C-alpha cells in the first residue's frame, strides 16, 4: 500500500476495535497473554472478515496503531484480506494510566505530521481529543469504538462521511493492489 502525499491516514487499533471483547478483556499479566496475539487465540473468531474490504475502500492510507505491532500483519491482516500495513512505532503501553493522555496519542500526531488523520480505537478520551486539537495542524477525527461490539456499520458511516469532507480525498485514486 503506497502513501499518497496529503492523503488522509487511518490509524487502526485491534483489541476492542477489530477484535471485540464481548465480555472479555485483554489479559493484563504477561502469563495470561500467552497466545493472545497468535492464530490459536479463540477470540479471533469474533473478527468480522467483511471489515477488510470496507477498510480498503476508504480513501485513506491505513496504518496499524496497536500493541499487536507487527503481529497485526501476521495474524489480523490475513484474516481481513488486507496486505501488510505500515505499523506505527508506539511507545510502551502504560499500565493503569487513568486520567492521563493515551499512550498512543503523541506518537500518532507525530506520524501524521500535519496530514489529516482518523484514529479508530476503543480507548480514546476527551483528553486525547483536546490534546490533538491543540497539537496537530491538520484535520483529525478521533473515533471511539465500543470495545464490547467493535467496529460497526455505523462506525464505517462516520469514517466515510468524515473522509468525504476532506478536500480531494475522493479524487485521489488508490493504486491497484498487486
Image (spheres, grey):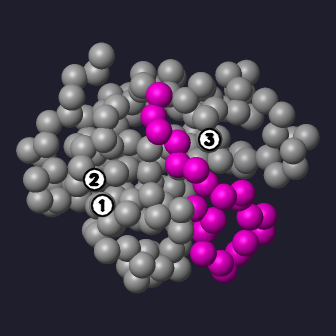
Provide the residue designation for mark 2: 8
Q: What residue would you read off at disc 1?
A: 115
Secondary element at image label 2: loop
The answer, for residue 17, to whether it is visible in the render is no
Real-space CA distance between mark 1 and mark 2, rounded to the nearest whole angstrom: 6 Å
At 28% from the left and 53% from the top, the residue drawn is 8
Classify residue 37 as left or right of residue 87. right
- Give the image location of residue 2, x and y in percent: 31, 35
Residue 97 x %, y %: 73, 72
Earlier along the polypeptide chain: callout 3 or callout 1?
3
Magenta range: 84-104
- Which quarter of the rendering shows the N terminus? top left
Position of residue 167 relative to residue 176, above or below, is: below
Was residue 100 drawn as part of the magenta stretch in this picture? yes
The circle on residue 134 is none
In the shown orientation, is residue 42 left or right of residue 104?
right
Label 1 vs 2, first from the N-terminus: 2
Q: Which residue has dot 3 on it?
A: 69
6 or 156: nearer the viewer: 6
Q: Quadrant of residue 120?
A: bottom left
Report x, y in % for residue 4.
24, 44
Amino acid at each position: 500500500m503506497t502513501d499518497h502525499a496529503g492523503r488522509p491516514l487511518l490509524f487502526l487499533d485491534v483489541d476492542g476495535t477489530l477484535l471485540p471483547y464481548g465480555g472479555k478483556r485483554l489479559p493484563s499479566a504477561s502469563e495470561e497473554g500467552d497466545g493472545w496475539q497468535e492464530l490459536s487465540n479463540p477470540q479471533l473468531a469474533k473478527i468480522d472478515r467483511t471489515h477488510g474490504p470496507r477498510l480498503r475502500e476508504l480513501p485513506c492510507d491505513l496504518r496499524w496503531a496497536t500493541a499487536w505491532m507487527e503481529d497485526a500483519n501476521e495474524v489480523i491482516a490475513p484474516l481481513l484480506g488486507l496486505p501488510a500495513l505500515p505499523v506505527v512505532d508506539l511507545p510502551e503501553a502504560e499500565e493503569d494510566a487513568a486520567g492521563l493522555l493515551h499512550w498512543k496519542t503523541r506518537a500518532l500526531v507525530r506520524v501524521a505530521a500535519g496530514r489529516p488523520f482518523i484514529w479508530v480505537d476503543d480507548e480514546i478520551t476527551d483528553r486525547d481529543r483536546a490534546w490533538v486539537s491543540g497539537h496537530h495542524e491538520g484535520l483529525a477525527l478521533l473515533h471511539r469504538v465500543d470495545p464490547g461490539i467493535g467496529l460497526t456499520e455505523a462506525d464505517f458511516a462516520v469514517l466515510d462521511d468524515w473522509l468525504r469532507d476532506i478536500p480531494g480525498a475522493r479524487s485521489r485514486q488508490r493504486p491497484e493492489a498487486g
